[in-house]
Amino acid sequence: MAKKWQISRRRMLQGVGATIALPFLEAMGKPFVSVPFKKSPVRTAFLFMPNGVHPEHWTPSSYGSNFDLTRQLAPLAKLKKDVSILGNLMNHNSIFQGADGHYAKSASLLTCMPIKQTIGDNLSSGGVSVDQVIASYQGRDTLFPSLEYGLDRITTGVDINVGFTRLYGSSISWKTPNQPMTKEIDPKLAFDRLFKPYIPGVKVKEDLWKKSILDAVMEDANSLKKNLGRSDQDKLSEYLESIRSVEKRISNEEKREKFSGNITADIKKELIRVNQNINEYEEVYGGVDITEKTRLMLDIMTLAFWSDASRVSTFMFGNSVGNRNFSFLEGVSGNHHSISHHMNKPQLMEEYLRIATWHVEQYAYFLQNLKNIKEGDGTLLDQSMIVFASDLRDGNRHAPRDLPILLGGKGGGKIKGGQNLDFGKETPLANLYLTMLQAQDINLKQFGDSTRTLNSILA
Amino acid sequence: MIKKISPVIFLLLLPYLSQGKDTLSYETHVRPILEKKCIKCHNTNSPKGGVNIDNYKEQARVIENGAFWLKVMDQIETRAMPPKTEPALSMKDYTDLIEGIDGILQKSLEKKTPGHVIIRRLSHAEYHYTVLDLFGVSFDAKNYFPSDGSGGGGFDNQGKTLFFTPLKLERYYDAAEIIVDSLYSDDDRWEQIVPFTFNPTGLTGIKNWILSFFSTKYKGLNDPQIAAERVINQVGSKAYRRFLKGEEKGRLLELFGQVYAENENLSNPSRFNTSIAQVLKGILVSPNFLYKIEEEPDKEGPYPLSHFEVASRMSYFLWCSAPDQELYDLAYKGLLQDSSVLAGQVKRMLADPKSKRFAENFASQWLGIEKLIDPQPMVEESLYPGFDLELRTALYKEAGEFFYYALTKSKNFLDLVNSDYSILNRKLAKFYNIEGVEHDDFRKVTFADNKRGGVLGMGSVLASTSISTRTSPVLRGKWVMEQILGISPPPPPPEVSALTEDPSIHEELGLRKILELHRSSPECQSCHEKMDPLGLGLENYDPTGQWRETYEKVAVDASGVTSEGERFNGPYELRMILMQKEERIARNLSTKILSYALGRSILFTDEPALVKLENALLENNFNPEPFMIELVNSYPFLLKINDFEKKSI
């Protein structure tokens, strides 16, 4: 679909997994570790798309397992059996007195609780987001509890006429109701953080003193805390927790060794390829080609899941109210948010549809990545639950009902896949999250405003 | 020039006027009128425009949210409310409401409070400049650190929206390493930071030994611990913006000792230097460096900031960086609560080229033009070719240069609204179609005509308020209201539809006609009749900010009537109308700059300080200098109050 930025070297190399990897267990298997029936872990990701979709070309017309993909879902053709289309879900807490068209919906997409209307003084997403709940369980065994990626910097400023800081539109992942996770948008920095030491020829200086330095500044923070007021103390506790978390990672030799052991020859090959593409992207494209950037970030997520660097991730295609210029797509001329207010004009709706389709294409690319990788008896995709979601149905009306939600992967055998489902009008979105939590043995009774689990998605 | 002062401000300025008579009671005088005239639309079930007045059942609540009630009063006072479709207020109700609300708010202000400023992590710009000033290393913090959001007045230096996460800590750590490495690789700079070459066996060692008999400066330099302590004192106190506490120094020394002991295989001076390098990293990751901290001793009520805290507030406000030696010395002498000393320092700091950092940092955020330096294209290439990153970066720079000029050279903040010049280079002059500019650096260029002037003639602002295929008079109008006049129109109703983007309809009707149609629906009218004309008056600028007289074939019509009935034709006349609204402009600049300076949202209790700031502008022909002096001397800038919540330890 892309007009510009013709084929790059990376695409000639054909994406991830043209080479087939060793299964997860084999890669990890040290002879003396005897875990005969250890299950490979479930990976979870949430991909957020701003501004909604064309409401009429999303949901397939027939339900169950036998349905035809709509235009916007067409990129999923090869993955039809791996993805379900989840109909009529709604985030009830995204609408409340004083809620605006966008921020109140995106910031709460993964918390399913109402956010607080504020220009920044008492930020609250209402709750911990589902990815962070999962990370608090699944993240214990990995180097990184979760990874937060995106394409755009946080949108600056406050939207005074609706009374929200734009920060709300830039964060879907919330560690606490008051603290958004930090999103990485630079492929090179994101890649280096996880994999730099494993690139042949790259020398990573050993930092012998990191622990001592962190110890010293932690003591600084502890003694400082005594002299501060309450809200300052709360703020400083973010710092203290960060130190603790990093210290834990660097001092956990076992975990790090295990991770090194995960880097098989196949993963290494892929690491080298992705690293090369990142360098090429920075040099050749000057950071402009958004499709390329998206795929690089998704490649890094793939590698992170594959190497078990982390099991939980979020990815934001854009910030809420994102007004990316999508003119690089054939038949589109203009910016995403502006086009989303299409006034039901056919021409604009067509452009709107093409933009959404581009997003689904990238989602499909990610699923295919995971599917190309063998793990255990199946594929990495079989071990995953990958959600695609927008916080709006039709952006023109800021419609919060019947959200466009897709669920890819089999969740370690717990998820059925390949269905077009209608859960009935205004079914809480939180029900999906509750189901996903329970499917990976996180046995919470409730999440957000959930009322029950969605049993029809289960295998 | 005689300044008209609006009744609201007038009353606030002269509290004794209302002290004579009893203030009206909220419950018995004000609330009944509100119930009769306002609550029908602004109630809990359907708060029109997001405004819920019903909620305010008691006077205490009104005071708690005084800022909101100032807006309410403003709406009533300007007769924007009740809307024209409803019966107007009787004269008695009108005065009772205004006087009643004003009296209640004023009473609440008699008990002064400076407001609480939360500890603030350095913004990326602040980090960059602090490191540059301290170590001479230029580090690209903006692109290396994950981006921050904005809060409060819309700036990135507001504590509540500056977060810390493990990822950020990793980046700060890696940044410290990069900075110290870069320092270490440059002998001259290293020597400035670590002035004593520690080398007990070499010639310097003997020299130091001999010199130590004549000057204490050289005493004990052959002892690595003592030499290290010197470096720690010097660097640490600059980095922490105050003297080091014993325990802090102890920890850094301990770190030094630990590294030094284990590096015994190295010979000096590299043994000493590598050990000091670790200490420098520690300083750069310490919360005392990364956060601007104001401690809370056990005190009741408002009390003055410490002198070092004032020094930091001033230097981060005006220089975007740590205090220099002079500020540090004044803090040490305890002179930074003295108003004449402060005035002198503000003058000195504004005259220093470092104040350009304030200009750039503040202006770009106030004007909301960050999009320009994002590599992604802003406008449709085919329609507006050549609007590339290089050009956009130059336009971005123009805004900062221009603000700096108004701040320090022309010394007139009204230039921001209208001027007969801008600060341009050849590239921009060409873009603006101005002849005879051959210099590649940015210099003042006087316009030959009145097509441009002030920020409203700048490509940066005009492009930021357009979309990729066309201008948006609504966005531009809203921008003028919010950023110049400080008025925020209420949000559009939730189910409202935006303008059509269909090019054929645009051709047929023209944007002006489409907006007229849109305005004709009553729910849209009250706001759009304010916003649209302001934006339409800028139609002579295309989506990149270039001048145009026609859209393809049809002539541009940039005439209009403001909601207050002023007629204009074209951007220049529009600017002339805006220039008359001095109080609005003064209040807006005061609010924005005070919020930036304090790093927090403006509270209702800042009202007295704001009134003084506003007057500093109005009474001095918008000269920024007395204004900035007033700000630094203001109550919320120099005082603090402890958090009302209990400490957690």
Image: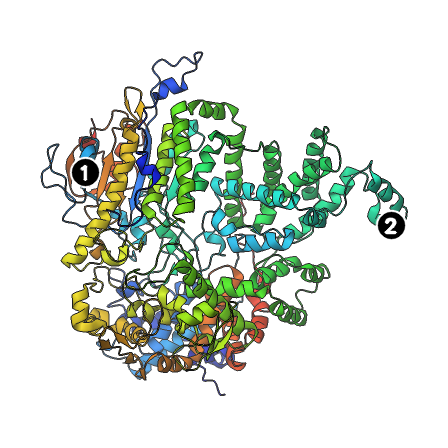
Whether marks 1 and 2 lie on the same chain: no
Measure the C-alpha gap from mark 1 to mark 2: 81 Å
Q: Are marks 1 and 2 in contact (CB under 8 Å)?
A: no
Q: Which residue is mark 1?
A: A85
Residue B396 position within the rendered picture, expressed as x and y whole percent measured from the top left: 44, 64
Amino acid bearing label 2: Ser
Q: Residues within 10 Å of mark 1 (few under 14, many from 20)?
A: many
Q: Secondary structure at mark 2?
A: loop
Q: Nearer the viewer, residue B148 or B341?
A: B148
Q: Nearer the viewer, residue A44 or B73?
A: A44
Q: Which residue is mark 2?
A: B215
Instruction: Tell me the residue at 35%/80% (across/down).
Output: B574
Amino acid bearing label 1: Ile
**Quadrant location of the C terminus of chain B?**
top right
Which of label 1 and label 2 is nearer to you?
A: 2
In the current view of this chain or complex, which residue is farthest to the bottom?
Answer: B1
Report if residue B82 is visible in the image.
no
Q: Secondary structure at mark 1?
A: strand
Which image quarter: residue B632? bottom right
Above or below, A311 relative to A337: above
Residue B575 position within the rendered picture, expressed as x and y whole percent measured from the top left: 39, 79
Could you say which disc has been placed on residue B361 in the image?
Answer: none
Above or below, B174 relative to A255: below
Which image quarter: residue A409? top left
